[in-house]
Image (cartoon, coloured by chain):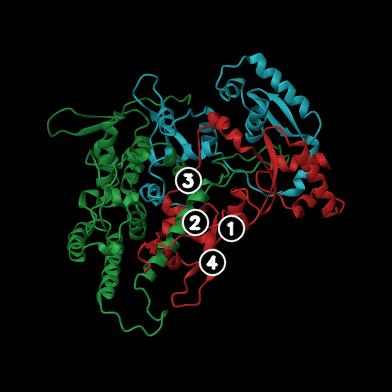
Chain colours: A red, B cyan, C green
Amino acid sequence: MLSVLEAALLTTPEPLSLAELKKLSDVPLENCFIEELLEQLMQKYASGGVELNRVATGWRFRARPEMQVYLDRLSPEKPPRYSRAVMETLAIIAYRQPVTRGDIEEIRGVGVSAQILKTLEARGWIDVIGTRDVPGKPSLFATTKQLLDDLNLRSLQELPSLEEMGNLLERDES
Amino acid sequence: MLSVLEAALLTTPEPLSLAELKKLSDVPLENCFIEELLEQLMQKYASGGVELNRVATGWRFRARPEMQVYLDRLSPEKPPRYSRAVMETLAIIAYRQPVTRGDIEEIRGVGVSAQILKTLEARGWIDVIGTRDVPGKPSLFATTKQLLDDLNLRSLQELPSLEEMGNLLERDES
Amino acid sequence: MSQVELQLFPRAFIHGEPMLEMPHDLYIPPDALELVLETFQGPLDLLLYLIRKHNLDVLDIPMAQLTQQYMSYIEIMQRNRLELAAEYLLMAAVLIEIKSRMLLPRPPKVSEESVEDPRAELMRRLLEYEQMKLAAQKLNQLPHAGRDFELVQVLIERTVEQRLPNVSVEDLRQAWLALLARAKLNTHHKVRRDELSVREQMTRVLRQLSHGKFEAFESLFDVSGGIPQLVVTFIAILELAKETLVEITQTETLGNIYVRANFTLTATE
């Protein structure tokens, strides 16, 4: 069973949940049994080029980040680095969700193009989870589990904490 | 170096040749040194869910055949995806046609394997519509009607405009 | 207005000339328009920069002058990025409003909290924006799958019949985004919709000529497609000639024009 688990996780780039891992066996398995096997796998890969991680939607293997510099030599293809506009929009959705496009524009002080939201939706990082009950019924955006997976995080709480901002007016606080 | 090799082979479903594996290191390596490392890796994976194989075009990991019956339970209907190299080649042919393999390589900044072009030709999405009148008479590739049909488009003009897309990216890699 | 020392901005060039100064206030010199649009995410971002980097008191900006500058700026903006102009103009209006409120005689103090600093709302917005701006930077620094680390994917040979991958227009878009991100394609590989229609016609004409023989110039046009189509086909043939993919000949003045592909298609391909 350990080998089956290993083969499944190594052949699937997407994370596998406990429920999915259970499907690998034709006899019902206890969660704690699978977790024990996963623990053993983690031990097995404690050193070497890849590691087993737990992320938002389950378990998956990834190459250790320090390998990237070597692997990049093999294929220089890289997914895009997003512009500041895209990243700021993503940050606002991540930290203030659920938000409407209007909310994002209010915070950024500039219009947010439909293209930006489409880019993030196409990447699977945000989606519409409803509409706000005001005139025009604007869509409410939230981040997805896919975003957490791609950032190797288990939950939104693992996002970098927001910085406490100082007062801009302290000079003439009289 | 063993870890780098391991990471490279585990993250690439296609076989890697000795020449490609050599690119992973910034110092020149002897063939026999790499072969020795590959031997060690084979030992490491002598038991478990996956194995390291030598095939015609190089080395690759694959799930042991006896694992398949289990793995099929996991996701019988997950459609495969083309690699980024294939998609980028297709995009270049779609937007810049007619182009030669050299043109594609110039835009991508890396070599384009014959395999990639063959994959797209076999799918009926591109074909050779002539040759360019320069030394070597390189073939000119263009997209077919079949591609438009499969993408549910009436004409190439319905493809997303690249100008809008460019605005979403960072202008400077700093 | 306190004249602020502004630093060199090494990467900024306008018309080939290095731009030495960033704007002193919310006014953007016409020449610097593109630079400012690229450097700043909007008026809040520009204002934050001015306050943080130069200790600029935003309320010290001479308002009459600022307004004048803004009006001339709007005229230039009307030609391309009007929506952004509006945002910068709105910010200027907000600043003017705050300043005018601060110049009014203060009502006799009734209690401490009833007198609200007119700047408070703007400052709250600036701080909220700054917080998000920093959060975006941190998010960008987190390792991203595919960019900073690879996912493990070992081959699995399925015994079931081979399925062909599905590709959507979105996938193509993503592929181009990746290409754009990598190469400096922005400058020399811009493809507009109208150019794509030319590319489409180039392919059609080449296919028609693939037998290698001369064809009458007129026969390459599809008359049923309407005038725009004819023009696009014409441009496509010129483009093909420019890339020396076709040969255009005319044996006598005002005689018939013939076009031939500049290659013979070998059947071995």
Residue C76 visible from this viewpoint:
yes
Discs 3 and 2 carry the same chain letter:
no
Determine the residue positioned at 23% across, 53% down: C3
**What is the residue that sits farthest to the front in this orientation?**
A174
The residue identified by callout 1 is A144
Q: Which quadrant of the rendered structure holds the C terminus of chain A?
A: bottom left
How far apart marks 1 and 3 lie (CA) works out to 22 Å
Looking at this view, is B17 or C202 the one in front?
Answer: B17
Q: Which mark is residue C172?
A: 3
Q: CA distance from mark 4 to mark 3?
A: 29 Å
Disc nearest the viewer among 1 and 4: 4
Q: Quadrant of residue C261?
A: top left
Pinpoint the chain carrying mark 4. Answer: A
Horizontal arrangement in the rendering, residue C240 relative to residue B81 (left or right): left
Q: Secondary structure at mark 2?
A: helix
Looking at the rendered structure, the kind of residue marked 4 is Pro
The quadrant holding residue B29 is: top right
The answer to whether dots 2 and 4 both sit on one chain is yes
Q: Nearer the viewer, mark 3 or mark 2?
A: 2
Q: Nearer the viewer, mark 4 or mark 3?
A: 4
Q: Does dot 3 land on a helix, a strand or a loop? A: helix
- Nearer to us: label 1 or label 3: 1
Residue C58 lies, in percent from the top left, at 30, 62
Q: Is residue B116 above or below residue A168?
A: above
Amino acid found under the numbered disc labelled 3: Leu
Report x, y in % for residue C151: 63, 41
Tell me: C127 left or right of C246.
right
Q: Amino acid at mark 1?
A: Thr
Q: Does residue A43 lie above or below B78 as drawn? A: above
